[in-house]
Image: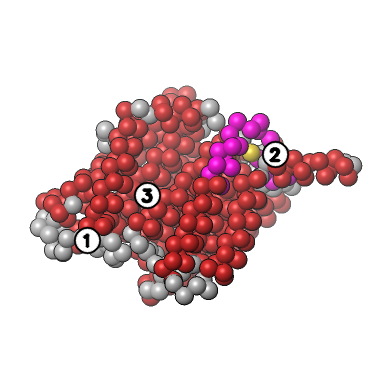
Amino acid sequence: MQLNEQLNQIGQSLAGIVPELFLAIFFLGYLVAELLVNRTPDKEKSASWLFFISLGGAIIALGLIAGQWDTPPDFRFRPLLFLDNKAVFFKILVVTAWLFTLLHIRLLRYRFPPELNGLLIAAVLGMCLLSMATHWLTVYLALELLSLSSYLLVALSPAKKAAEGALKYLLFGAISSAIMLYGISFLYGLTGTLDFTNPAMQLGLAANTPLVMNVAMLMTLGGLLFKLSLVPFHVWTPDVYEAAPTPLVSFLSVAPKAAVLLVLMRVATAFPAELLPLLGGIALVSITVGNVAALWQQNARRLLAYSSIAQAGYLIVGVVAFNQLGFEGATFYVAAYLLLNMTAFLLVDLLLPRSDTPLADYKGLGKQHALVATGLTVVMVALAGLPPTVGFTAKWLVFSALWDSYQQQEQPWLMWLLIGGIVNAAISLAYYLRLPYLLFFKNATNQPLPAIYSSGGKIISGILLAAILVLFFKPEWLMGLIQVI
């Protein structure tokens, strides 16, 4: 390739990653702004300035990403990145989660160090790159950028518990990262390529024994399974969810899952079919472990942590169905889960602002704050997968895809996964309905909240509650968008 051709290719590639370039420049610009703004003696005013700078940057990034819609699918820095409507959709989900987190922090008046916003920008940059990654080297580097930012975000709180949670997160993350890196090297030795859009990867793996192939695939997927909180890489989840401040837990519980799910969908089409039973087994074990462990939790955030392990398993159900409806259902599920989980954390925090969220403290709050408590009840019903909520629609889509796949392939493991998923959905009712029971059927043990939180909560709760219900009656509004990607 001539030098002019190389320069043209680099220019075209740079034009395709404008949002990511903006985020990188914005990250550096924010660090400079932080140094300048923090010199003012009024800390409250400087915090407001930094918040609005971050909010403005998030809105600009969202606009730049939306502008990529309907861009002709093509590689950027072939074969490292691939931009298509799928990548754009998932990047929109990530930036939406970022905006929601900033509003959550503002509404509840959290006081974080100014470094918070810079770390969020870096994490979002990592997830945007991850959404376009089609090469294991790019996946690893983007995942590390996301992981390092996440470890620091968890450690931001001055509480001792946050430092402990961040240390556990770091240790488990380092182990999963090392396993993934070794798996990638193993994969390269077997196939001679790290590009999982290259047919040589599938052919190279298929030429080996099933044991070697499964070990290589499982180790390579270690970092992705860690971010999805799937068994056996789930141990960090409850400790981190309990230790970190609620807005950051809300962000980390959904945004990384969205980016990683797209990578997993791309990988599923590139790896041999033997990967699917392996992923199906991981999904069923994760659903079961998450739901059963959640039954004994006495803390709202730990309960939602085990819930997220189970919900991640349901996300994978759509992937292992391995048909068009399965991929569309998984995409619908992750969008619905982002809405539901971030709403759940916000409402939990609105009822008891900046608390450690023990379940006992929510007794009787439904009588004091009826609208917020009703919204939380609807969210819990939606997470359980009951109508009339978008959670029911999401589960219906992934189970329908799994059933269609079983009818076509008649593989017994698909039926076991379907039965296990439905049984676990029934089990989950026992813990999802605990919060509504405590809110409305137990006597209060704490004081009413200040009016500022209640009034803001009423507005936010009403908007989110409407979205959760409307997407049940009008799922085509979201599904129609997903079908064109």
- Alpha-carbon span between mark 3 and mark 2: 33 Å
- The x, y position of residue 481, in whole percent, is 48, 29
- The x, y position of residue 119, in whole percent, is 53, 62
Residue 305 sits above or below residue 162 on the image: above
| Residue position marked by numbered label 1 in the rendering | 450
Badge 3 marks a residue whose secondary structure is helix
Residue 17 sits above or below residue 242 on the image: above
192, 30: nearer the viewer: 30
Sooner in the amino-acid sequence: mark 3 or mark 1: 3
The crowd level at tag 3 (other Cα within 10 Å; few <14, some 14-19, many 20+) is: many
Instruction: Examine the rendering and report whether any part of residue 274 can be seen.
Output: no
| Residue position marked by numbered label 2 in the rendering | 75
Instruction: Examine the rendering and report whether any part of residue 77 can be seen.
Output: yes
State the residue at coordinates (43%, 35%): 332
Quarter of the image where the C terminus is located: top right
Badge 2 marks a residue whose secondary structure is strand
Residue 88 sits above or below residue 302 on the image: above
Q: Which mark is residue 342?
A: 3
- Alpha-carbon span between mark 2 and mark 1: 53 Å
Give the colour scheme shown: secondary structure
Badge 1 marks a residue whose secondary structure is loop
**In the current view of this chain or complex, which residue is farthest to the top?**
408
- Alpha-carbon span between mark 3 and mark 1: 22 Å
- Is residue 92 found left or right of 203 in the rendered image? left
Magenta range is 61-82
Check residue 73 for magenta coloring: yes
Identify the image quadrant of residue 302: bottom left
270, 390: nearer the viewer: 390
Sooner in the amino-acid sequence: mark 3 or mark 2: 2
The crowd level at tag 1 (other Cα within 10 Å; few <14, some 14-19, many 20+) is: few
